[in-house]
Amino acid sequence: MKSLRITTEKNAELGADLDQFGKQNGSIITILPKNYRYPLAANFIAEVLESGRADTMKEAFTLYEEQ
């Protein structure tokens, strides 16, 4: 239970950092739905779009969920 609480707190901190980054850098991150606005998801989605593994955001979300 302790590790789950720590993980949840860390995820919340990272989400807040990412929101702040998005505010400072325009709409780079804010185009993502809230469920994907944390570094792990954002990086994965960006990578699959840049590499051509996904052609649309919907495809990128699906690939992320499958991982």
Image (tube, rainbow, N blue to C red):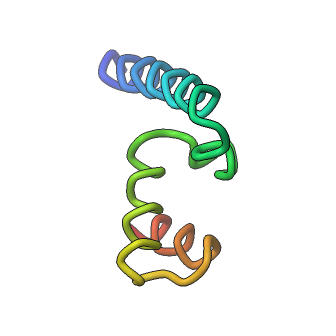
Residue 44 position by quadrant: bottom left
Q: How many marks?
A: 0
- Residue 3 in the figure: left or right of residue 52: left
Give the vertical position of 29 relative to 17 (above or below).
Answer: below
Quarter holding the N terminus is top left
Residue at 64%, 51% (x, y): give it. Answer: 32
Location of residue 51 (image quadrant): bottom left
Q: Pick out the residue farthest to the front.
A: 25
* Residue 23: % across, % down: 64, 28
Q: In the shown orientation, is residue 34 left or right of residue 3?
A: right
6 or 10, which lies in front? 10
Q: Of residues 59 and 23, which is closer to you in this image?
A: 23
Residue 39, percent across and down?
42, 41
Q: Position of residue 49 (x, y in %)?
A: 46, 73
Query: In the picture provided, is 24 more to the left or to the right than 45?
Result: right
> At x 61% / y 78%, what residue is drawn?
56
In this view, 21 is above or below 32: above
The residue located at (59%, 28%) in the rendering is 19
Q: Residue at x 52, y 72 (%)?
A: 60
- Name the residue nearer the viewer: 10 or 48: 48
Q: Position of residue 14 (x, y in %)?
A: 44, 26
Near-viewer residue (1 or 51): 51
The C terminus appears in which quarter of the rendering? Answer: bottom left
Above/below status of 30 relative to 4: below
